[in-house]
Image (tube, rainbow, N blue to C red):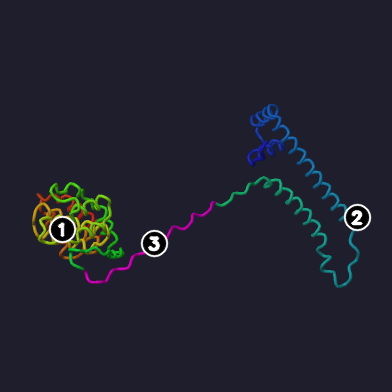
Amino acid sequence: MTNNSPLYDQIEAFLKDQLDAEAREAMRQAIAADPDLAREVALRRLEFEVAEALIANQIRAQLHTLRTEPPPEPPPDTTRTTRYRYFFWLIAALLGIAAIGIYRRYAQTSLTLPAPSPPPGPSRQTPARDTSPLPQARNQSAPAQPAPASTSNARPLALATELYQRPQFETLRSTQAAPNAPFEAALTAWSNQEYAAVLSALRPVSDRDPQHLRAATLRAHAQFNLKQYAQAAVGFRAVADTRTMPWAEEADWYLLLAMAANGQSGSSDFQTRLAQLCSDSGHPFADQALELRRRLRAGQ
């Protein structure tokens, strides 16, 4: 039988006749039905009897010593020490009784190991801001450092990346273009999420190319996914300001996301463009713009 504190207390109460009649009868029946419990009760009873006998003998011996063997007359310089000798023997006897009681009461207290603390998480480093002049919207293949997520820009950046949806440019493939044409190579890299390769493939496309608006839009999206938000905003603004449909309307929305991610959500240009898009109920991205404005205001 495994010792535990509740069972120990119940056995002690039974042996000391501290249970009521119903509990005592139930304990008797349990002892009769469980040999292990009966053996445990017998051991506890023997332990109590031995302990009580030892304590009684020790107290009797100490009291007898105090009565029959008075200490010899102390020398003159030990009078103060001898004055408390009788009290010492009495205190020693009481401490012996208390020690036995404490041992019997807490002998079965189990130890609980503390839970291990979790390992510290990895530290996060904020990238440094790129202070070099912004290049032109076209022909940008060199990766640029993203703007750091400062305390004031953390929410707009998170909101912009959350609302951004990756377009399916694969539907824009031309059936007449050669397989190795720059735009076709850029679309292949886009489908493989190789955004730096997209910028490299679009480098030869000029403003006189019939597909230059498609190329500019694809380039800006690649820059956004590379976290080059300032360059992406330049590209989307160039397409939006042409007012050539359907590229301009899509660029209106993604320009707002790029500006917000770049920490420009408080600029007058951003606020003006956002208000115009929200007020144009016929714009395909009007609902998204209203949601962006609502969540930006909620975070202020």
Is residue 92 visible in this depiction of the protein? yes
In terms of depth relative to the viewer, which is nearer, 128 or 39? 128
Residue segment shown in magenta: 115-134
Image quadrant containing the C terminus: bottom left
**Residue beneath the point at 79% across and 56% down:** 90
Mark 2, residue position: 68
Mark 3, residue position: 124
Upstream in the sequence, badge 3 or badge 2? 2
**Residue beneath the point at 82% across and 62% down:** 85
Looking at the image, residue 262 sits to the left or right of residue 18; the answer is left
Q: Position of residue 83 (x, y in %)?
A: 82, 65
Estimate how packed mark 2 is, as few (under 14), some (14 to 19) or many (20 or more) residues with alpha carbons within 10 Å: few
In terms of depth relative to the viewer, which is nearer, 279 or 197? 197
Q: For residue 116: magenta?
A: yes
Q: Position of residue 216 (x, y in %)?
A: 16, 58
Mark 1, residue position: 274
Q: Which is closer to the viewer, label 3 or label 1?
A: 3
